[in-house]
Image: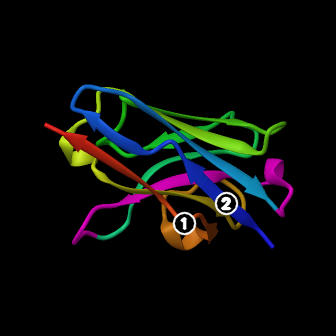
Amino acid sequence: QVQLVESGGGLVQAGGSLRLSCAASGRTFSWFAMGWFRQAPGKEREFVSSISWNGGNTDYADSVKGRFTISRDNAKNTVYLQMNSLKPEDTAVYYCATATGLGYPSNAYEYDYWGQGTQVTVSS
């Protein structure tokens, strides 16, 4: 059974930084692309970033480009999301997920296993 456990969320002031981690188990981690999504209260879940199986390719939502960086360590079965220059509109529950197939997609339906989420709150 695949398990994804996010950590690193918290409360930070605008302009600050956080680093999220997602530890995976139960699947050969290095075979699959990984993604980060977020969901704010009253809003739909939205794509944040994705990374290919070997880390060679990444994708970002326009709203986070230049501020967030996704990376992975296949030896540690962990994917990271470094978030800098945080804004109040980044406040959301952040989820990591494993992709079902090839590529590093931005659509949530192309991901099959999800973590429980970690809360990120950015105060103004």
Is residue 93 rendered to the left or right of residue 116?
A: left
Query: Magenta includes 41?
Result: yes
Q: Mark 1 points at which residue?
A: 116
Measured as percent of width and height from the top left, residue 90 is found at 28, 46
Q: Name the residue under label 2.
A: 4
Seen at 49% across and 60% down, the residue is 117
Seen at 81% across and 73% down, the residue is 1
Q: Distance between the residues labelled 2 and 1?
A: 8 Å
Relative height, residue 51 to residue 105 (above, below): above
Figure quadrant of residue 77: top right
Is residue 12 rendered to the left or right of residue 32?
A: left
Q: Residue placed farthest to the front in the image? A: 11
Amino acid on which disc 2 is placed: Leu
Q: Give the range drawn in magenta.
A: 26-43
Query: Magenta includes 38?
Result: yes
Is residue 83 rendered to the left or right of residue 42?
A: right
Amino acid on which disc 1 is placed: Gln
Seen at 22% across and 72% down, the residue is 42
- State which tag comes first along the sequence, 2 or 1: 2
